[in-house]
Amino acid sequence: MHVFEVNDGELIGSLTAQAKERGVTDGAIVALIGGVDSFTVSTMSADDATKELITDYDLPGEMHGSGEIKDGAVHIHVTMAVEGDRAVSGHLHRAQIGAWFARAYVIPVK
């Protein structure tokens, strides 16, 4: 198992770079935990499941999630706990790390 840590910067880009550095082209992201300063997620349209509804959130969130690395591409689904005891979830497109950290626990496949 590999532990990828991000203390400052964009999460997806950093995880992609760390996976490449360690030679992980395919793997399971079995756990993702941390806190983000802002993030972008998408969900599926109720009228057309092939259409993504992308939303940017300029607010911090407590994050947990899981996903995969397939052919070097990082794919993560998350739930973010945000102010007001609310949860925002979906496919993660972007997450900015700065005030806190993120850790991804990755089991390589192959």
Image (cartoon, helix red, strand yellow):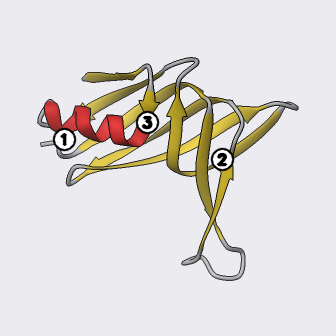
Please give left or right for residue 19 compared with residue 56 in the image: left
**Identity of the residue drawn at 43% across and 19% down:** 7
Question: Foreground residue, 27 or 53?
Answer: 53
Q: Closer to the N terminus: mark 2 or mark 1?
A: 2
Looking at the rendered structure, the number of numbered marks drawn on it comes to 3
**CB under 8 Å between discs 2 and 1:** no
Please give left or right for residue 22 compared with residue 82 in the image: left
* Kind of residue sitting beneath label 1: Val
Please give left or right for residue 62 compared with residue 17 in the image: right
* Residue hosting label 3: 11
Please give left or right for residue 59 compared with residue 105 in the image: right
Whole-number angstrom distance, CA of label 3 to CA of label 2: 16 Å
In the rendered structure, find residue 109 and report the number of the disc placed on it.
Answer: 1
* Kind of residue sitting beneath label 2: Ser
Whole-number angstrom distance, CA of label 1 to CA of label 3: 21 Å
Q: Give the structural element (helix, strand or loop) at label 2.
A: strand
Q: Residues within 10 Å of mark 2 (few under 14, many from 20)?
A: some
* Residue hosting label 2: 89
